[in-house]
Image: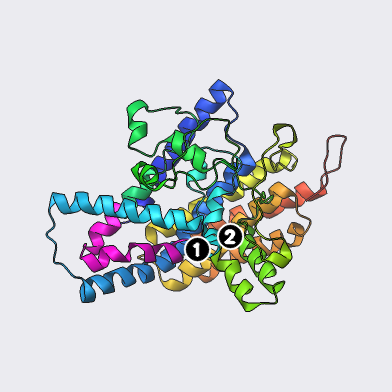
Amino acid sequence: MNYITLSVPVFFILIGVELAYSFYKKLNYYRLNDAIANLSQGIGQQLIDVFMKTILFFGYKYIFENWRMLDLPKSIWIWIILFIGVDFCYYWFHRMSHQINLLWAAHIVHHQSEEYNLTVALRQSWFQSWFSWVFYLPLAFLGFDPLIFITLSSFNTLYQFWIHTRAIKSLGPLECILNTPSHHRVHHGSNPKYIDKNHAGTLIIWDRMFGTFQKEEEEVYYGITTPLASWNPVWANVHYWDELLRTARKSPRWRDKVNVFLKAPGWFPEHLGGFQKPKEIDAQDYDKYNPEFHQRLSGYVLLQFVIGITGGSAILFLHKTLPVLPTTIGSVFIVLTLLTCGALLEQKKWLRHFEYSRLALGIAIVLSLEFPIGYQVIFTGIQIISAVWFYNLNNAKPNAEEIPEV
C-alpha cells in the first residue's frame, strides 16, 4: 500500500489551511510561481517512482530473502527497533547527500525553493530514490521484513511533511527529541552557519549525537547558495549534474574528474580555485527569484496545472490497473504540462510553438488510447479551449500595463 499516495488529499488540505492562515495574517508565506514549481517537482517525483519503486524494492527484498542473518519475529518491539533503524539510516543518507556531490546533485532539488511552506515538503528530486535505497540495505541483511520496512519508511517520510512550515515556532521540550519545524528551517537555510545542519528525519537526537545540530537563531534565508533562478521542473533536476560535468571537463587530471563527483559541494580542483566557501548573506542585496508575468496568464497557468495534477493523481491511484503504454505516455504528457506551467511563469519565447504542439499531442494521445468516449470528449474539449485561450493571450492588443508576450 502506497501510504504517501493515499496522503495526497490530506497534503492539499493542510496546504490550504496554511495558505489561508498566511493570507489572513498577511505573512506572505506563498507565491504562486514558487508553489507551482514545488508541487510540479512532487508530481514528477511520484510519477518517476511508479516505474522505479518496484525495481528498487527488489534489491532490498532479494537481500532479505537470500542473505539475511536473522529470522526476526513480527512483534511490536521489532517494529519499534526498525523505526529507530530506518530513522538512523535516513540520517546518514541525508547527511551524505549534503557531503558528496554525486548525491547532492539529486538532493539539491528539495532545497531550491526560496520560500518555506508546506509545498516545499513536496518538492522532491526525481532521481533521489535511485541512490537512497542503498543506505537501508543493512536492515535487509539484519532480517527486517521488507513490507514492515516499506511501511515505516513511508511514515518516516510522512512525518517530515508537517515540519516544512513557518507557522509553528517551537514545541518546547519536544525540541530536544523530535525534528521540528524550527530545526528543519535551519536545515533549509543558505546562511553559512546553517548549511549542512539538522539532517534528522523524525528524531533530532542523531544530529545532537554526531555533531550536526544547530539551533535556530538568526533569520533564515531559504534556498541554495547559487539560486536556481528557474521554474523549469526538468532543469531543476539536471542543472547540478550539468555543472559537475562542465567542471569535470575542465579538469585535465582523471583524479580531479572523479573527485568532482565524490567531494563535498563547493569543492573544485586547485587549478579552478580550490574549495569555495559559502558567502555571508547581505540582507540589503538579497532578492528572491521572482520574474514578472502578466496576471492574465494566471488563469491559464492554473488550468494547465490542475490538468497536470489531476492526470498525475489518476496515474498514481490507477497505474496498477493500467497497461504500461498509457501509463508511460500519460506520464510524459503530464511532465510536458508541468514544463508549460514553468515556462509561462517565466514567459519563455519558445513556448509559443511548444504549447500548440503539446495541446495537439494531448488530443492525439487520448484519442489513440482506449479511454471511454466521455473522457475523450471532455479532454479534447479542454485542449481545444486551452488552444483558443492561449491564442488570445498571445494576440491580445497590448496596453500600457502589458509586459512582453509569451
Please indicate whether residue 11 sits to the left or right of residue 238 in the image: left
- Image x and y of residue 5, in percent: 38, 52
Query: What sort of colour scheme is used for the picture?
Result: rainbow
Residue 87 in the image, given as x and y percentages of width and height: 33, 51
Residue 139's quadrant in the figure?
A: bottom left
Considering the image in quadrants, where does the N terminus appear? bottom left
Dominant secondary structure of the magenta stretch?
Answer: helix
Q: How far apart are the two marked residues, 2 and 1, measured between alpha carbons? A: 8 Å
**Which labelled disc corresponds to residue 317?**
none
Assess whether residue 217 is covered by the magenta stretch: no
Dividing the picture into quadrants, the one containing residue 252 is bottom right
Please report the residue visible at 42 percent of the width from the left and 27 percent of the height from the top. Answer: 170
The amino acid type found where label 1 is placed reads Phe
Label 1 sits on residue: 127
Cβ–Cβ under 8 Å for marks 2 and 1? yes
Front one among 19 and 381: 19
Question: Which residue is pictured at 50% across the width and 31% down the height?
Answer: 166
Q: Is residue 190 left or right of residue 216?
A: right
Q: Position of residue 95 (x, y in %)?
A: 45, 54
* Above or below for 78 versus 176: below
Q: Amino acid at mark 2?
A: Asn
> Bounds of the magenta span?
126-152
The spot of residue 303 in percent (x, y) is: 60, 46
In this view, the residue in front, 372 or 174, is: 174
10 Å crowding of disc 2: few (<14), some (14-19), many (20+): many
Label 2: which residue?
237
Closest to the observer, 378 or 172: 172
Furthest-top residue in view? 25
Query: Could you say whether the residue bearing mark 1 is in a helix, strand or loop?
Result: loop
Q: Is residue 104 visible?
A: yes
Q: Residues within 10 Å of mark 1 (few under 14, many from 20)?
A: some
Lower position in the chain sequence, tag 2 or tag 1: 1
